[in-house]
Structure formats: C-alpha cells, structure tokens
C-alpha cells in the first residue's frame, strides 16, 4: 500500500515531527525543493500526511466527497473541552447538518451589526496604548476576547469571561497542550471537564434567561440567533458556542498582530492605509493572511482510497493542503516573500490559491467575521495612531504556539498615538 504514497524524507518519524513542529515553514519549503509539490511526511503517532500545494490538487481535496475526506476525526483530543456535538469534531451528514444550522449566523450582511461594537472596543483599546514600545499580540488577545464574548454570547459577564479565558488557555498555551498530548485523551478527559463545568453552568443560566428574553428575535448576537432559528438543544448550543470561542479568538488576535508587525516594517503601506483607502485595507488584510497564515495546514483523513495529484492514495492516510507552501508559490504570487498588499488590488484572491481559512465544506465558518473584525480594528488603529515603528529592524521570526504560527516576540512595535480630543477614549457601552 505504502508504495503508492508520494516520496518523502527517510529516517525516523521523530525527526520529521521535530522539523515540522519547530520550523514548519522552512522545513516544508526544503521538502518541496527536494520532492516537488506533493510529498509524504511521517509524523509520530499520526497517519502519514500527504502534503499537497498545487492549486489543482487543493481543488480536488476541497471539492472532494466529504464522506471520504474526514476533518473532524483529527480533532478528537479536544472532545472533552469542546463537547461531543462540536461542529469541529463531526464528519459526514452530522457535520453538514450542524454546519447548516450555524451558517445563517455568519452571513456577510450579518457582520454589519457588529461594526459599531468592534469599532468602539478597538477605539477604547487604542486609546489605552502608551506612547512607547509595546507587544501587540497580548493586546489583540484581550481585544478579540472582548469582541467574541460580546458578539457570540451577547453579554458582558466578568465571571464568564474569567472562566472562558482559563478554558481557552488549554488550547493555546504550548506547555499545557504538550501535557495534553503526552497524557493522552483518557487522562485529559477529567481535567478538561473541570475547566469546562463552570463555563457550562454559567452558559446554562444565560441560555435559560435568553430563551425568555422578549427581544430574542431582534437581538443580533450569535447565541440569540442560534436560539431563535437553529432548533439546537441547550447542550448542543453550549458546545457550539465554546467551539466558536476556541476557533475564533486566538486565530484573529494572531492575524491582527501579524498585520501590525508587517505594517510597522512597511511605512509606505502604513501611510496608504492611514489615507482611509478601503480597498487597500482589504488588500492589507489579505496580504497579511497570505504571507503570515495563522494555521499552516488543514488535514483530511481518507476513509476510502482516492486519487490526488496523480497518486492513488490508500484509506488511512491524511491529505494536507499546505497553506504555507501554497501562499509562497512564485507562479501564483510573484516575489512571494515580499509584503505587497497591492497584489490583491491587481488580482483577486483565488478560491484554491488563497486558503488561510481552508476550503470546501470545512472552510472556516467565521471567515467573514474574522475579515470584518480585522478590518474594523485596523481602521481604528490607523485612525488613532500617528506613527508605527518596529522596535528593531529585522522581521519577527515565525514561531509555533500550540496550533497557531505567531510572531516570536509578540509583534513588538513603538507607537505614537494621536492626541486630538476626537480620538480620546470613549467608554465602551454597557449592555449587550
Ligand atoms: C484570522 C482568523 C481565523 C483563521 C485564520 C481561521 C482559520 C481556520 C481554518 C484554517 C479552519 C479549518 C478549515 C478547513 O479544515 O478547511 C477553520 C475552521 C473553523 N473556524 Fe476559523 N479561523 C479564523 C477565525 C475564526 C472565527 C472568528 C470563528 C468564529 C467566530 C471561526 C470558527 C471556525 C469554525 C467553527 C471552524 C470549523 C468549520 C467546520 O469544521 O465546518 N474561525 N478556521
């Protein structure tokens, strides 16, 4: 069977795992130079991964039969934390029906409802920045947590936020994640349960309150929309709300941190952004997610043999569209290592060549939310900050933090805020 797998590096699995975990970008680039667009990586304790990075192969995977290409199975370790009904863990018909129930809450036009809320939270955050060096990533984590709590739950509840923040730590803190992997799902279950229970209790109360709310139909937070229209029971609702927080918080914060890390080193791009050019803002967001994708690959476990990129792959292997490699193809993106937002003014982002959110029936449910939030936050930063400089000349190294690729030093920049009274902090409104 393995004779049909594409070529790949020889030697112990531990070595490949180390290369992939510690330096995914350079390691995958080296393997592409050696083996071409399609190669096999043997990762410890995992099915063999067949990495693909040609647009035709990625199209095949993203448009392939979802009953053959499973994505949920690979996330099973998160089950005690996300809950068994999480859309991230499901496959086949169960996944499709759950996804369908959630999709309406994420339609593009729904995002407008969050515009003012995000702008206010971002303005408040920017107004608190000191006129000195600061690390952007922790700031963006606080900001995106506030946004997602308000947009998803529609509440400002300090106790819920504290419990949610400690639950989120288990998915983002590398030391804890390593513990989870080493301990294995059996031992981790009760531990995750302890973190999850207080969040469940508070959510159960909030759901009961919300079911009775006279303005339920008019509310635009995601919990209210799912309550009013999806027909989900309480347990499913809780699992999906937590899934949205886990999937949407760290990812968006990291993408925003990268945007500022790049802009601080590209003064012309920063100035053009500050001119208020909305098309350019969109291009900056797309170029950031191209050059510094937050997630390096997506995985599909084959449940039946499938032909991909000219290889007859057996069931049991995982096919992995490699986002890092796709986004650095010189035939799609000339001068692929350059940060050049203009490229997205000259050519649209391709469905199978710009893939920071994955694709097909598993494409990120929160993609429009994330893009909308990134733009709203960058708009406020551009309006509230006069100068943005890097703390030192060289680019920040890309490093892995659990499953995301983050700036090694947290995106350290030096800012000088504008001081005009119009831009001073306004209180973040209370209520929803
Ligand atoms: C810049 C920010 C984000 C990035 C880079 C990102 C990236 C991704 C990627 C790569 C996937 C897997 C797609 C695949 O397998 O093809 C995914 C799935 C998902 N994301 Fe995001 N995401 C972001 C923000 C968000 C936000 C804000 C939310 C929710 C509010 C969210 C909710 C989800 C969900 C629910 C899934 C699972 C979809 C499914 O399995 O059907 N994400 N995301």
Image: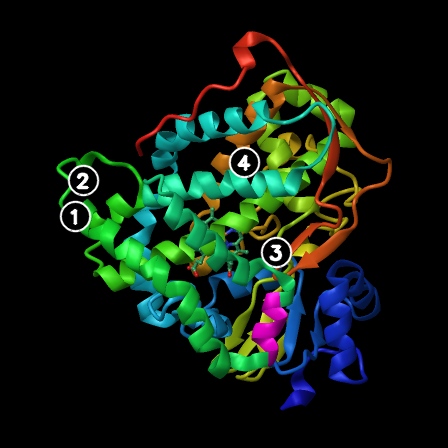
Along the line of sight, the residue nearer the viewer: 359 or 219:
219
State the predominant SS element of the stretch in magenta.
Answer: helix
Compute the Cα span from label 4 to label 2: 28 Å
Question: Element at badge 4?
Answer: helix
Tell me whether circle 4 and circle 2 mark residues in contact (CB < 8 Å).
no
Q: Does label 3 or label 2 sit earlier along the sequence?
A: 2
Q: Does label 4 or label 2 sit earlier along the sequence?
A: 2
The residue carrying mark 3 has its beta carbon less than 8 Å from ligand 1 = yes
Residue that label 1 marks: 211
**Tag nearer the camera, 3 or 2:** 2
Compute the Cα span from label 4 to label 3: 16 Å
Q: Position of residue 117 (x, y in %)?
A: 40, 29
Q: Position of residue 188 (x, y in %)?
A: 49, 76
Q: Does label 1 or label 2 sit earlier along the sequence?
A: 1
Q: Quadrant of the C terminus?
A: top left
User: Residue 267 vs residue 310: left or right?
Assistant: right
- The residue range painted magenta reads 176-182
Question: Element at badge 2?
Answer: helix
Residue that label 4 marks: 374
């Amino acid at each position: 069977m393995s004779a049909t797998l594409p070529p790949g590096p020889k030697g112990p699995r531990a070595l490949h795992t180390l290369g992939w975990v510690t330096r995914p970008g350079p390691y995958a680039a080296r393997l592409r130079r050696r083996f071409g667009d399609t190669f096999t990586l043997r990762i410890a304790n995992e099915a063999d991964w067949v990495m693909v990075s040609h647009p035709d192969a990625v199209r095949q995977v993203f448009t392939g039969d979802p009953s053959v290409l499973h994505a949920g199975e690979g996330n099973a370790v998160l089950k005690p934390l996300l809950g068994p009904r999480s859309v991230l863990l499901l496959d086949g018909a169960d996944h499709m029906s759950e996804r369908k129930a959630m999709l309406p809450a994420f339609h593009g036009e729904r995002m407008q409802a969050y515009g003012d809320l995000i702008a206010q939270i971002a303005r408040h955050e920017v107004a608190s920045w000191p006129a000195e060096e600061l690390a952007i990533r922790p700031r963006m984590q606080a900001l995106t947590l506030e946004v997602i709590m308000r947009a998803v739950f529609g509440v400002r509840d300090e106790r819920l936020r504290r419990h949610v923040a400690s639950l989120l730590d288990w998915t983002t803190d590398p030391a804890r994640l390593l513990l989870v992997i080493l301990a294995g799902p059996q031992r981790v279950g009760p531990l995750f349960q302890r973190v999850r229970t207080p969040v469940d209790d508070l959510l159960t109360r909030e759901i009961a309150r919300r079911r009775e709310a006279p303005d339920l139909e008019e509310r635009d937070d995601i919990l209210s929309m799912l309550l009013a229209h999806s027909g989900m029971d309480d347990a499913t609702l809780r699992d999906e709300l937590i899934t949205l927080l886990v999937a949407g918080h760290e990812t968006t914060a990291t993408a925003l941190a990268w945007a500022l890390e790049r802009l601080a080193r590209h003064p012309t791009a920063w100035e053009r952004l500050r001119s208020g050019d909305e098309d350019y803002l969109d291009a900056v967001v797309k170029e950031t997610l191209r050059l510094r994708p937050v997630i390096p690959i997506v995985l599909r476990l084959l449940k039946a043999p499938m032909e991909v990129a000219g290889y007859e792959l057996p069931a049991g292997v995982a096919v992995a569209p490699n986002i890092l490699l796709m986004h650095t193809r010189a035939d799609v993106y000339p001068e692929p290592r350059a940060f050049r937002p203009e490229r997205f003014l000259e050519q649209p982002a391709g469905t199978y060549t710009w893939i920071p959110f994955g694709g097909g029936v598993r494409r990120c449910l929160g993609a429009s939310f994330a893009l909308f939030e990134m733009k709203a936050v960058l708009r406020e930063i551009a309006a509230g900050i006069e100068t943005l400089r890097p703390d030192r000349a060289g680019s920040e190294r890309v490093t892995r933090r659990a499953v995301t690729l983050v700036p090694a030093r947290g995106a350290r920049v030096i800012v000088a805020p504008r001081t005009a009274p119009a831009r001073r902090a306004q209180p973040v409104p209370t209520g929803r």
